[in-house]
Amino acid sequence: MPELPEVETIRRIVERELAGRTLSSVELTLPKLVRDSPLPDLELLVGRTLLAADRRAKVLVTHWSEGLSVLTHFKLAGQLAVLRPDGTRIVAGHPVPDPEGPFPHKATHLTMWFDETVAYYSDIRQFGWWRLMPSDDVDDALAAFRFGPEGTGTAGFNRDDLAGRLQRRRIAVKQALLDQRVVAGLGNIYVDEALHRARIHPRRSANDLNPDEIDRLHPAIGWALDRGIEQGGAAIRRGKAYPRDGFPTVHARKDEPCTTCGSAIVKITVGGRGTYYCPVCQPEPAGVS
Ligand SMILES: [Zn+2]
């Protein structure tokens, strides 16, 4: 968290609430937030207008007037809060600071004023980063991440390409799907959801899936990401799912009934990540305990 659906939700908020507005001032209280940045000083944005927001995998790209752009990665705990002049607010990303609570929070490291509209970036873990650069350099900067195709919303993600990328990996399919070079933007929650929908055990070896399983997995990935985006990101609080409309269906639902067969959802660890699955719908591979 935040995963692709959360970042896409933030992108939509930025487009709706901030695009067309001019930055009147900026306050950065955690200098390391702007690291490995071709241009180190966010003050360069003051007086410029935010034109548009794009996203590639889990990286938010904002474009500003006169040829500057910013790449933002929210990592584990980034959160964006926009407070409007009428006192209403919209908050997306990590659930801490409390979206209903006062801003700035002690974990708020960057404040951007667009006249009366204020945007707060908070990050309790401080792993997130902001990079300012000429807009002409954005494509190269994104290419350096070697992201795989987007798992949602584009023609670039096709079944055979996914099959090829999985075929080359002799690791658990759960771990393979978390590799951003396989599918860009898939994170822990959505991999669990896609594997459950495709009825594939998370410890199956990626290079061992049969064509029928790939046929099920490919649309399941798009489905999981789209469901997440639809509801503005999954809600997980203190390790428990707070589903809306039944999603997530397995992630963070240990001991709850599987929506397909009613069996109790099991939690295991795969590649160091908490992993949830249905032991009946997603049968254990032979030889793995
Ligand atoms: Zn089941």
Image: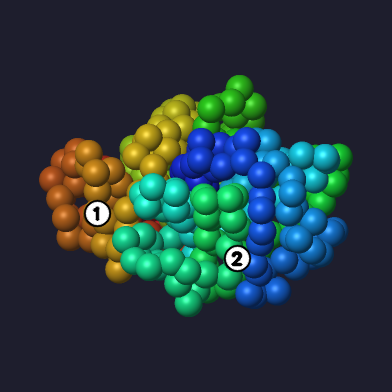
With respect to residue 155, does 249 lie above or below?
A: below
Which amino acid, by three-letter code, is at mark 2? Leu
- State whether label 1 is within 8 Å of ligand 1: no
Q: Residue at x 66, y 53 (%)?
A: 24
Q: Position of residue 160 (x, y in %)?
A: 60, 27
Q: Looking at the image, can residue 285 be seen?
A: no
The x, y position of residue 275, in whole percent, is: 37, 59
Label 1: which secondary element: loop
The quarter in which the C terminus is drawn is bottom left
Q: Is the residue 104 above or below the residue 262 in the image? A: below
- The percent coordinates of residue 55 (x first, y second) are 62, 40
Give me the residue at 58% from left, 70% from top.
109
- What residue sits right under mark 1 in the picture? 242
Horizontal side, residue 120 vs residue 203: left or right: right
Q: Please tell me which residue lies in front, 70 or 185.
A: 70
Tell me residue 159's x, y (percent). 56, 27
> Considering depth in this image, is 224 or 13 the residue closer to the camera?
13
Relative placement, left or right, of 41 versus 57 is right
**Vertical side of 123 occupied by 83: above or below:** above
Q: Residue furthest top?
A: 155
Residue matched to label 2: 110
Marks 1 and 2 sit apart, C-alpha to C-alpha, by: 29 Å
**Badge 1, how many Cα within 10 Å: few under 14, some, many 20+?**
some
Does ligand 1 reach within 8 Å of label 2's beta carbon? no
User: What amino acid type should be assigned to the residue bearing mark 1?
Assistant: Tyr
As helix, strand or loop, the secondary structure at mark 2 comes to strand
Left/right placement of residue 204 relative to residue 49 reads left
